[in-house]
Amino acid sequence: MIDLTKDGGLWTITLNRPDKANSLTAEMLERLAEIAEEGAGDDRLRALVLTGAGDRVFSAGADLDAAKAGLAVSPLWERVSSAIAALPCVTIAALNGTLAGGAFGMALACDIRIAVPGAKFFYPVARLGYLPQPSDPGRLVSLLGPARAKMILLASQKIGAEEALSWGLVERVVPAEDLIGVARDLAQASLEGKPDVLRQIKAMCG
């Protein structure tokens, strides 16, 4: 349910559970964390693209049954987003559709986010009675400012792709058929670069 392809220095992770809106189980989160942690120690990795299978949903967040069993508040979410954020290469979230709940953290942890026109962004923790992942509010505030972060987290507002673009939540909105191609184009310069230089540039950007 987590597919990994390696094409030279480009790794592509695909959430592949489209019949369940790419909702995530504990096993899937474990695998995501393992891949990111492996990548941190592999100098061959120059760029990582994170995307989802299907044409409507990147991920609905936690699998419903797993959430009821405790996954909604599992530290696995933070482990995944922290591992992605710690990667010393460029990371690109290629959002093929709507992003909801705990999966938000994975996209926020990436350096660059691109999305299809129909994508929506939704983090309804206030309505559901859960706290967000520890690092997510800070990343949202850094990107959007405190008021817009509260629009998403406290008011549980669903943000469309164009509004997300105007807010700075995503960097580009591109047609679905071009999504992976655009992600690969964005990765190209890093694929031609040197690991130590990429690491330093990323550190300089904060």
Image (tube, rainbow, N blue to C red):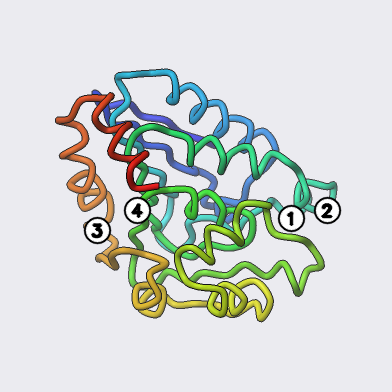
Query: In this view of the protein, which residue sits in the foreground, 203 or 175?
Result: 203
> Which of disc 3 and disc 4 is earlier in sequence?
4
In 3D space, how far apart are the residues under numbered discs 4 and 3 (Cα atoms)?
Answer: 19 Å
In this view, 130 is above or below 148: above
Disc 1 marks which amino acid? Answer: Leu
Q: Are marks 3 and 1 in contact (CB under 8 Å)?
A: no
> Which of disc 2 and disc 3 is earlier in sequence?
2
Q: Residues within 10 Å of mark 1 (few under 14, many from 20)?
A: some
- To which residue does mark 4 refer? 112
- The image quadrant of residue 59 is bottom right
Indicate which disc residue 177 carries: 3
In this view, 139 is above or below 40: below
Q: Which is closer to the viewer, label 2 or label 4?
A: 4
- To which residue does mark 1 refer? 64
In 3D space, how far apart are the residues under numbered discs 2 and 4 (Cα atoms)?
Answer: 32 Å
Q: Which is closer to the viewer, label 4 or label 3?
A: 4
Q: Secondary structure at mark 2?
A: helix
